[in-house]
Image (cartoon, rainbow, N blue to C red):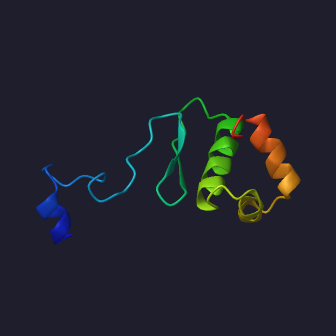
Amino acid sequence: MERVVLFTDSDPVTAEDLALSPPVAPGTVGTAPGGVVRIDFPDGGLSLEAVERALLVAALERAGGNQTRAARLLAVSRDTLRYRIEKYGLGE
């Protein structure tokens, strides 16, 4: 903590200074460092597709792009993962 205080320009210390992800905007789904999925549910609800896409992105990031490992993280077959990657346009 002392190091953060010494090396940051902001006062007070923010979540960004601590390498924590900032809160997501209402109605959005995002991933934080380390593959943590952050979801903010707006009053009107949130698309299941947006949540699924964010989970795919998080799993692929955590697996270093390795589809087999990402599929294991999500407990789905590699074929299912590949179908969903194509569905959401996440391919290379």
Residue under the image location 70 percent in, 59 percent down: 66
Q: Is residue 61 above or below residue 89?
A: below
Looking at the figure, which quarter contains the N terminus?
Answer: bottom left
In the image, 44 versus 56, the foreground residue is 56
Q: Is residue 59 left or right of residue 86?
A: left
Residue under the image location 62 percent in, 45 percent down: 54
Q: Is residue 55 left or right of residue 4?
A: right
- Percent of width and height locating residue 72: 76, 65
Looking at the figure, which quarter contains the C terminus?
Answer: top right
Residue 6 occupies quadrant: bottom left
- Percent of width and height locating residue 25: 44, 36
In the image, 18 versus 45, the foreground residue is 18
Q: Is residue 86 left or right of residue 10?
A: right
- Percent of width and height locating residue 15: 30, 54
Q: Is residue 57 left or right of residue 79?
A: left
Q: How many marks?
A: 0
Residue farthest along the bottom direction in this orientation: 2
Q: Is residue 72 above or below residue 28?
A: below
Residue under the image location 61 percent in, 33 percent down: 45
Q: Is residue 41 above or below residue 8?
A: above
Residue under the image location 63 percent in, 48 percent down: 57
Residue farthest along the front direction in this orientation: 92
